[in-house]
Amino acid sequence: MILEKSQNKISYDEFKEMAYYFGIAIQPTFSNSVLDKNPKTSFVDIECFFLSATYYLKTSRVAEGFLCWLLKFGHLLSPSKIRRLIQAGRFFDPAILGGLVEFLSENNIRPAQWKIVTPFCKKRKEVTHLFEGPAPRLPSSYFLKYRIIAPLFKLETDKFLLPVATVYKNCPELKNRALFGSIVNADVVSYLGKHPGSTPYQIAKRTYHHKARVFEIYADVLAAS
């Protein structure tokens, strides 16, 4: 399996911490991580989490949990920001990315906007399995398109996701995405909420948004806080 660019790859434990923080009901392994030991006090980027999932869907539970998460929260993702992260060298698996984008499109989750990400999606040279285990009788069409065999998951959101009210209470990054019409505004508000006193330059660097756009809204966000 070939992965694109090794910049900024996180560990599997860090990914599980992110997944739990964003509302997927999998047991995290808390460690010294990118989350500074406490995701409630450190900004966690949603699009970085999405790209991390492309190389950490290692078990049936994690894979189904993440797909359930996309069903519930995928409309809050920014395809343009994901493209920007990829162009900047963020680590990802292009075949799994293709499967996830196809899944979003099949479920009518902003299909037109995901077209800007498809140039970075690549089929596997050979057919491979998403994770170890017996071959499924009914493979999922969205992964099979990229030569990946994975089960056609039932996608039981009540089983694999924490209650939405709980997620929004504990995760301002997702809550603010749901409240604001602008992705940039939501991320700036979330970042300042956890890191008050940050400069526009610091926010732009940590949220991966264009500096000009962050500088443009910074004063208004502060005034409204």
Image (cartoon, grey):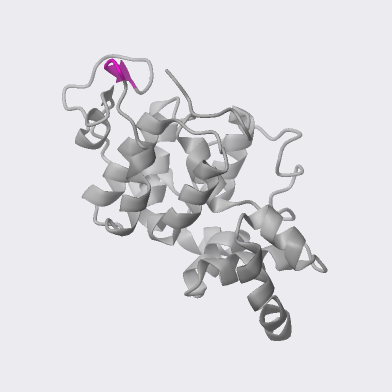
Q: Is residue 44 above or below residue 123?
A: below
Q: How many marks?
A: 0
Q: Residue furthest right?
A: 197
Q: Looking at the image, which residue is at 61% across and 61% down?
A: 210
Which x, y percent locates residue 92?
49, 33
Rendered image quadrant of residue 98: top left
Which x, y percent locates residue 113?
33, 58
Query: What span is colored magenta in the figure?
Result: 125-129
| Front residue of 154 and 214 | 214
Which x, y percent locates residue 166?
54, 60
| Front residue of 165 and 64 | 64
Q: Residue furthest left?
A: 137
Q: Is residue 210 above or below residue 137?
A: below
State whether residue 78 appears in this view: no
**Quadrant of the image containing the N terminus:** top left
Query: In screen coordinates, is 41 left or right of 105?
Result: right
Q: Looking at the image, which residue is at 61% across and 40% down?
A: 17
| Front residue of 14 and 54 | 54
Q: Looking at the image, which residue is at 26% across and 39% down?
A: 154
Which x, y percent locates residue 211?
66, 64
Magenta span: predominant SS is: loop
Q: Residue furthest bottom?
A: 223
